[in-house]
Amino acid sequence: MTVTQGRVVADRYELATLIGQGGMGQVWTAYDRRLDRRVAVKLLRPDRVAGQEADELRRRFLRECRVTAQVDHPGLVTVHDAGSEGDELFLVMQYVDGADLSDHLAEHDPYPWQWAATVAAQLCAVLSAVHAVPIVHRDLKPRNVMVKQDGTVTVLDLGVASVMDTDTTRLTHTGSPIGSPAYMAPEQAMGGAVGPYTDLYALGVLLHELLSGEVPFAGSTALGVLHRHLYEPPLPVRRLRPEVPEPLERLVLRLLAKDPQNRPASAQEVYEELVPLLPARGTPTGAPLDPTRPFLRPHAPWPDRARIPAPQPAPVAPAPPVDDKPDVAAAVDEVKRLLGEGRITQAVDILGAILPAAADQHGEHSPVVRTLRKQYAATLLDDGQYRRALPELRRLADERAAEAGQADPQSLRHRYEAAQCLEQLGEPAAALAEYRALLPYYENRYVSGDPQLAHDVRRRIGHLLLALGDRPAAHDMLARLLMDVERVHGMGHPLAADLRRTLQWLGQMRG
């Protein structure tokens, strides 16, 4: 079965973008139609489960997925669903916003040894929880490790390798190992019993790669690589990077011991050896993808919203047609359909991805692009993505004001929504300033004259004054608003009742 964008797996998961593929299958970003969320879907290749072994592999796959889904650790990717469809097996996982460790390493050359130690320490915490089940990962490698925006590490593919590694004798028959040769422990390569020590060997390979930039054993063929694992000693990393501390080099060499008995006894033991090398508590830089941060400020929220804007994931772009010119009209129709079905997350991604193409085709300031930007901003707002909506709303407000004047109702509406974003993002002073700037326009009957919006803005100003600790000003604003609401709508209006409760509470605080 050909795997294509738009295919729906299990009548629920719509494939969006291919993000990785290897010997065992493909990984796609996808949309969960039922819960309207991004997910990652791994499809295991049909030829891996074909033939007489298919039924047994499916049975073992589902069993392993059920077991691994029960392992509770923040460093493990959450398993949402698993099953089979036709000749394929599928695994639905949490979508992790970050970079896989292989890409992270490529972007930081050389990789700071402090980062390597903190990544390894986090992996030890994960492996310790996994080995306690007991489960052996069997395929620990940089591509199966994600570094999230807050610096925490997430391990992928737990349990899948154990299913695919059912017949290690295939290695001798075909010359193609089921696992990843560069990270495969000698006992695994020989078809021997695997255990926690097997994962520790892979951790040693990974740590060596982070510190030196290269795996300890490379070669042109899989069998050649495995031969080196079996018979050649690794090159000590300090010969390549003298600044690496000696204890870290010694630990890597112990992890890479050919005999499992000569490796550390457990992931917990490895963690204890890494503790003296971890950074002391301090102030993080605020940069995303910094694996030292969890140790600098354990359990602290990230980022500090008052200082650092949260990074936003790039929208998942729909695949362009063959002529590489996306069909803007078709994308707009698709967005309408998705919004009609309540699938806001996917609609947001399509709108964000199609805007550059629409600007190229129709012009940045064309009515088509302006309409798309309005829809994009409104959808972001509906989806609660306030940080992404804010710059879009500000841009729309400024462009409209430049064309029609500061008092233009559309421009004012965009500014009002931008103020709402600031309020939701926990920036009360900025939101208060924006609402105060808007209020004269809404109170001026010759400019906008919208009493409902004027009342709402005044209420928001009062509540923001409370948030900022200015109770007298808040009381004054809300008391005057109550008088106006009762005059216009009567004492029984819901807003009047709400204002009375707030003012009563304020009076008690004064007392």
Image: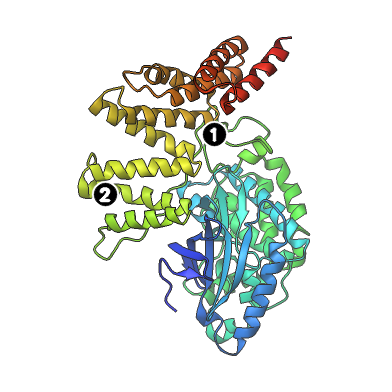
Residue at the image position 56 percent from the left and 61 percent from the top: 216
Q: Is residue 412 left or right of residue 260?
A: left
For residue 122, the mark is none
Q: Give the image location of residue 175, x and y in percent.
A: 53, 81
* Mark 2 surroundings: few (<14), some (14-19) or many (≥20) residues within 10 A: many
Q: Amino acid at mark 2?
A: Ala
Residue at the image position 56 percent from the left and 53 percent from the top: 146
Query: Does residue 36 sit above or below 507 in this rendering?
Result: below
Residue at the image position 56 percent from the left and 66 percent from the top: 182
For residue 358, the mark is 2
Residue that numbered label 1 is attached to: 286
Q: Image quadrant of residue 463?
A: top right
Towards the viewer: 277 or 492: 492
Q: Image quadrant of residue 375?
A: top left
Q: Secondary structure beneath disc 2?
A: helix
Q: Amino acid at mark 1?
A: Gly
Query: Does residue 385 sit above or below 498 in this rendering?
Result: below
Q: Give the image location of residue 407, x and y in percent.
A: 31, 22
Distance between the alpha carbons at the discs numbered 1 and 2: 35 Å
Q: Give the image location of residue 499, x and y in percent.
A: 60, 21
Q: Give the image location of residue 240, x and y in percent.
A: 54, 51
Query: Does residue 387 sit above or below 143 in this rendering?
Result: above
